[in-house]
Image: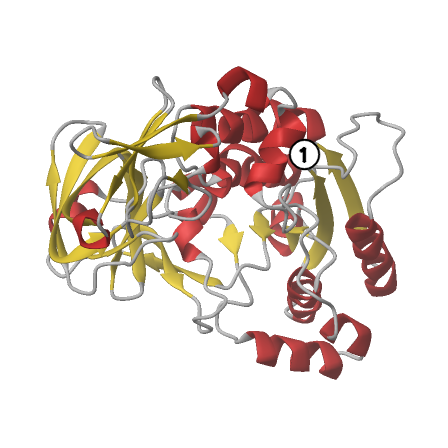
């Protein structure tokens, strides 16, 4: 077999040790691919960066399965790069009074880039993941579509993956529900894989409250920032808060107000360490300014019936949106139905039906 033909059969699979990537490995093998497992080591529970640290459990699980499936397996220790880029971005955004989603940065900058680099190094044409999305090649390029399982759809965090990534990525689970994937694991004779909990090994938050994480990474945060004033939208004093990084738009818990008001955080002023509160209905927005946007094809931004999705505390608009390009880095979303509690820094994704066409960051 020629080297070119061999490369077309070889595929790098991101393995997190959980059910999804494990079943993806089994399915790809059955489809005739020569699977090469790669586990990305981004974070350790004790923050150590010692190269001699013992491997975390999720990587040991991935290695065990790789051995059982007789597939090659590699570990990429990217803890330092992850800390310097993704975690630092996360901290910087909160210190700027914004509400970040580190996954949006991690996917193109680290996760997919490292998998592609490994694929090139090992002469593999394809990469694969256990994401519940579908990648479809259309006339204008490759597009991500929502997966079959609405509860597991992960497309929202992937709007900035470029064509260089999408054209080489396979997602074998996109056409299945989580329940079906567990059944497939049993059919392959791996009942223990079917029973696995969701793998959180790659995620540095690992179900930790972000406020605790901020304090863990910045121990003198409270001394640096301290308590600040809470005001209404006319500048009237209402009480105190514990420091602006601990709050986001739409929040009303954790405030020390002189009297109950029913008001909630509307704006965060990081420079003055001040929170501005408004009534719940005043947090409705009919327009959203979006920065650093990305589209597979810019022409898609002018199509009708665009859905705008913003995950978080707020409520997504139920009707369609119109996008107006302002500059190369900024656009405005004009909504038919209000969005509630949009926080600066949150990812904004644009869809036409189940097709993801682009996204950006709320301002």
Q: Is residue 237 left or right of residue 170?
A: left
Residue 8, percent across and down? Answer: 59, 52
Q: How is the image coloured?
A: secondary structure
Residue 70, percent across and down? Answer: 84, 60
Q: Is residue 166 above or below residue 33?
A: above
Residue 190, percent across and down? Answer: 79, 75
- Asked which quadrant contains residue 198, the reply is bottom right
Mark 1: secondary structure: helix
Which residue bears the numbered disc 1?
121
Residue at horizontal 69 percent and vertical 62 percent from the top: 25
Q: Is residue 255 left or right of residue 49?
A: left
Q: Residue lying furthest front in this view?
A: 258
Residue 322, percent across and down? Answer: 11, 51
Q: Is residue 109 above or below residue 351?
A: above
Return the residue nearer the eye: 237 or 88. 237
**Mark 1: few/some/many CA within 10 Å (<14, 14-19, 20+):** few
Q: Is residue 58 above or below residue 174?
A: above
- Asked which quadrant contains residue 222, the reply is top right
Residue at horizontal 66 percent and vertical 23 percent from the top: 219
Q: Quadrant of the C terminus?
A: top left
Count of residue discs: 1
């Amino acid at each position: 077999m020629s080297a070119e033909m061999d490369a077309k059969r070889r595929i790098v699979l991101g393995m997190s040790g959980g059910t999804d990537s494990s079943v993806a490995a089994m399915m790809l093998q059955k489809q005739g691919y020569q699977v090469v497992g790669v586990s990305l080591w981004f974070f350790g529970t004790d923050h150590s960066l010692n190269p001699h640290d013992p491997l975390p459990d999720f990587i040991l699980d991935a290695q065990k399965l790789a051995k059982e499936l007789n597939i090659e397996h590699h570990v990429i220790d990217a803890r330092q790069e992850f800390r310097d880029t993704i975690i630092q971005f996360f901290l910087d955004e909160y210190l700027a009074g914004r509400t970040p989603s580190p996954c949006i940065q991690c996917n193109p900058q680290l996760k997919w880039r490292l998998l592609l680099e490994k694929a090139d190094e090992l002469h593999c044409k394809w990469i694969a993941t256990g994401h519940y999305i579908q990648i479809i090649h259309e006339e204008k390029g490759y597009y991500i579509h929502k997966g079959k399982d609405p509860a597991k759809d992960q497309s929202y965090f992937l709007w900035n993956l470029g064509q260089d990534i999408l054209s080489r990525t396979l997602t074998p689970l996109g056409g299945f529900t989580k329940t079906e994937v567990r059944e497939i694991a049993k059919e392959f004779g791996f009942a223990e894989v079917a029973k696995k909990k969701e793998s959180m090994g790659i995620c540095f938050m690992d179900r930790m409250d972000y406020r605790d994480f901020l304090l863990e990474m910045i121990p003198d945060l409270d001394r640096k920032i301290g308590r600040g004033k809470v005001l209404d939208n006319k500048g009237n004093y209402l009480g105190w808060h514990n420091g602006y990084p601990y709050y986001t738009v739409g929040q009303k818990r954790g405030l020390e107000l002189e009297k109950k008001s029913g008001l909630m955080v509307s704006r965060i002023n990081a420079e003055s360490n001040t929170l501005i509160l408004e009534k719940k209905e005043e947090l409705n927005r009919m327009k959203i300014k979006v920065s650093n946007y990305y589209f597979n094809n810019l022409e898609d931004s002018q199509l009708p019936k665009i859905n705008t999705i913003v995950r978080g505390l707020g409520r997504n608009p139920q009707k369609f949106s119109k996008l107006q390009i302002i500059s190369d880095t900024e656009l405005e979303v004009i909504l038919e139905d209000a969005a509630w509690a949009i926080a600066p820094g949150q990812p904004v994704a644009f869809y036409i039906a189940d097709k993801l066409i682009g996204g950006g960051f709320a301002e």
